C-alpha cells in the first residue's frame, strides 16, 4: 500500500510518497510545492489514486506543546484528567481544542505526558483546505514532534524527515484526527450512499416488522383454531367441565383409565364370535379357539390349504396384526391348521 | 437500532408462536384418537365399577347366581380361585371355570352375561373346544375376574 505524507512547513509544502513492502517502508518520491493549492492542482492533474492513506504533518509552530508530570502512567486515567488540566492551563474549554499525548517514564519514576494540541477551528481550516483539494486524511501528526524538535531548534535534514515520515506511516505516535473529523472527511457521494444504505436498512427493517406482525397474527388465529378443536373434543367427552390444558388433562385421565383398564383385563370374545359367524368359512371348520386380552389361537381343519390361508388373512384383517399359520395333513386327507396372532385391541 | 431490536423481538415471537402452533397441531390430531380410546376403555370400566358397588359377595356366590339364572349350573364342572389383587378402591378375585357340554346358544349367552351383564365380572380368557362326541356341543375353560369396591 502507498502512503502519502504531506509535510507542511512554515514556507513550503512537501509530499513524500512511501510504500509499504514486506513489513518495510520504502521511500519512493519527494515533491515540493509552494502551498496546498499547488499540491491540490497536482492531485487533480495526476490523480494519485493509488494512494492508500494520506497523512499530514503540521509544524510545531502551528501546534501547542506542553509537558505535564503525573505520578502514574495509565493512559485511560490520564485521558480523564487531561481535559481539566488543559482548561486550567489554556483557559479554553476542552471541547474547543483537539489534543493527543504520549506518556514517557522519567528517571525519577514519574511520568511525563508530552501533550500536543491545536484549536479545533484551526484544525478544521487545515482539514477543509486539504479536502477542497481532494485530500481525505486519515492521520494528522507532526514530524517535528516525532523528531523531538519541540522548541523549534535546528531544521532537521531531509533524510531525518523521511525517516520520521516512515515512522508516522507505521505508527503516528500522536494523531489529532479524532472520530469527529473522520466523519466530516467523508466525501459527499459516499455520504449519499451511506444515507441511502441507512434508509434502505430502515425500510427493510420496517417491512420485516410489518411482515412478521402479519405472520404472528395469522399464527395466532391458526393456534386459536387448533385450541378450539382440542377444547371441542374435550368438552364433548366431559360436558360442562373446563380445563386449563384440555390435551394434557385428557392425557392424564387417559393414563388413569389405562391403569384401571390394566387392572380389569378383558377378552372380547363376543366380538370374535360375531366375526366368526360373519366370515364365510366355506369348507373350513373351527374345532377350538383360545382368546385372551392379548392373543388368539384358532385350531381347525379344512379340505385345502388355500382355505386355511384365506382364514389367516381374514384374522389378520380383523385384528390388524400379522398372524402365523401352521398346518399338517391328517391321515384322512384333510389339513389340520392352527392360526396364531398377538394383538393389542 | 430500535427497529432492529423490534424486528428481532418480533422474529423470536413469531418463532415461539410457530412452535406452539406445531405442538397444538399435533395435539389436535392426537386428541380425537385419545378420545376414542378413552370412550372405548371407559365403557367397560364404568360397567364393572357400577356393578361392583353393590353388597359384598364372594366370587363363588356371583358365579353361582349367574349359572343358576342361565340354567346351566349342572354344566359347571369346577371353579378354582387363582389370585386376588387390589388397585385403588377395587379388589379383584380371579377364578378358572370349567364348563362342559354347552350348545352354542348357551356359550353365547354365558359370554354375553359375563362381558355385558350387570355382574361385576370381566372375562380374562376363554378356551372353547368341540367335544369328541358331538360337533355341536362345546366345552369351555374360562378365566374370569370378579370385582368388588372396598
Image (cartoon, helix red, strand yellow):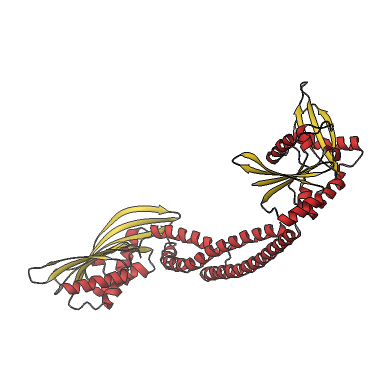
Q: Residue at x 31, y 71 (%)?
A: A318
Q: Depth check: give the residue in front, B122 or A271.
A: A271
- Nearer-the-camera pick, A139 or B97: A139
Identity of the residue furthest to the right in this view: A91
**Residue A84 location, quadrant:** top right
Asked where in the image residue A25 lies, by quadrant, the reply is top right
Is B122 left, or right, of A339 in this rendering?
Answer: right
Residue A299, x across and y down, in percent: 20, 67
Q: Is residue B94 above or below residue A101?
A: below
Instruction: Pick the quarter of the image with the C terminus of chain B.
Output: bottom left
Q: Position of residue A244 (x, y in %)?
A: 59, 62
Instruction: Tell me what residue is drawn at x 19 percent, y 71 percent.
Output: A308
Whole-percent x and y of residue A46?
A: 71, 55
Looking at the rendered image, the quarter that the N terminus of chain B falls into is: bottom right
Q: At which x and y percent is residue B144?
A: 32, 61
Decide if residue B109 is on the left or right side of residue B34.
left
| Residue A273 higher or lower than A151, as above or below | below
A60 left or right, relative to B22: right
Amino acid at each position: 500500500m502507498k502512503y502519502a505524507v504531506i509535510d507542511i512547513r512554515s514556507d513550503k509544502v512537501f509530499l513524500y510518497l512511501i510504500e509499504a513492502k514486506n513489513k518495510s517502508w520504502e521511500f519512493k518520491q519527494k515533491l515540493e510545492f509552494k502551498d496546498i493549492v499547488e499540491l491540490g492542482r497536482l492531485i487533480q492533474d495526476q490523480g494519485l489514486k493509488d494512494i492508500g492513506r494520506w497523512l499530514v504533518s503540521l509544524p510545531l509552530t502551528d501546534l501547542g506543546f506542553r509537558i505535564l508530570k503525573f505520578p502514574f502512567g495509565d493512559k485511560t486515567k490520564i485521558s480523564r484528567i487531561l481535559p481539566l488540566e488543559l482548561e486550567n492551563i489554556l483557559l479554553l474549554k476542552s471541547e474547543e481544542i483537539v489534543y493527543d499525548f504520549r506518556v514517557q517514564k522519567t528517571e525519577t519514576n514519574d511520568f511525563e505526558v508530552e501533550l500536543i494540541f491545536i484549536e479545533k477551528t484551526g484544525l478544521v481550516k487545515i482539514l477543509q483546505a486539504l479536502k477542497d483539494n481532494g485530500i481525505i486524511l486519515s492521520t494528522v501528526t507532526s514530524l517535528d514532534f516525532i523528531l523531538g524538535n519541540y522548541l523549534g531548534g535546528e531544521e532537521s535534514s531531509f533524510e531525518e524527515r523521511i525517516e520520521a515520515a516512515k515512522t508516522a506511516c507505521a505508527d503516528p505516535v500522536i494523531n489529532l484526527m479524532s472520530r469527529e473529523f473522520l466523519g466530516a472527511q467523508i466525501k459527499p457521494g459516499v455520504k449519499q450512499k451511506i444515507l441511502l444504505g441507512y434508509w434502505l436498512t430502515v425500510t427493510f427493517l420496517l417491512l420485516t416488522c410489518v411482515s412478521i406482525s402479519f405472520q404472528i397474527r395469522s399464527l395466532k388465529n391458526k393456534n386459536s383454531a387448533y385450541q378450539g378443536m382440542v377444547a371441542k373434543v374435550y368438552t364433548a367427552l366431559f360436558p360442562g367441565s373446563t380445563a386449563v390444558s384440555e390435551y394434557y388433562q385428557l392425557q392424564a385421565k387417559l393414563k388413569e383409565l389405562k391403569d384401571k383398564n390394566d387392572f380389569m383385563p378383558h377378552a372380547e370374545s363376543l366380538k370374535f364370535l360375531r366375526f366368526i359367524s360373519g366370515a364365510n368359512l366355506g369348507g373350513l371348520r373351527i374345532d377350538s379357539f383360545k382368546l385372551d386380552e392379548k392373543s388368539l389361537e384358532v385350531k381347525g381343519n379344512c379340505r385345502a390349504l388355500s382355505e386355511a390361508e384365506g382364514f389367516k388373512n381374514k384374522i389378520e384383517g380383523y385384528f390388524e396384526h400379522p398372524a402365523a399359520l401352521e398346518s399338517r395333513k391328517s391321515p384322512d386327507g384333510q389339513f389340520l391348521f392352527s392360526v396364531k396372532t398377538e394383538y393389542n385391541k | 437500532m430500535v427497529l432492529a431490536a423490534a424486528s428481532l423481538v418480533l422474529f423470536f415471537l413469531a418463532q415461539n408462536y410457530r412452535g406452539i402452533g406445531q405442538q397444538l397441531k399435533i395435539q389436535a390430531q392426537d386428541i380425537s384418537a385419545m378420545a376414542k380410546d378413552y370412550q372405548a376403555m371407559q365403557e367397560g370400566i364404568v360397567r364393572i365399577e357400577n356393578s361392583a358397588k353393590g353388597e359384598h359377595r364372594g366370587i363363588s356366590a356371583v358365579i353361582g347366581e349367574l349359572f343358576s339364572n342361565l340354567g346351566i349350573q349342572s354344566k359347571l364342572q369346577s371353579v378354582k380361585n387363582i389370585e386376588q389383587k387390589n388397585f385403588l378402591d377395587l379388589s379383584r378375585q380371579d377364578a378358572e371355570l370349567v364348563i362342559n357340554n354347552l350348545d352354542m346358544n348357551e356359550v353365547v349367552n354365558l359370554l354375553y352375561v359375563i362381558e355385558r351383564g350387570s355382574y361385576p365380572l370381566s372375562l380374562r380368557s376363554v378356551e372353547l373346544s368341540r367335544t369328541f362326541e358331538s360337533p355341536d356341543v362345546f366345552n369351555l375353560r374360562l378365566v374370569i375376574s370378579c370385582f368388588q369396591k372396598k
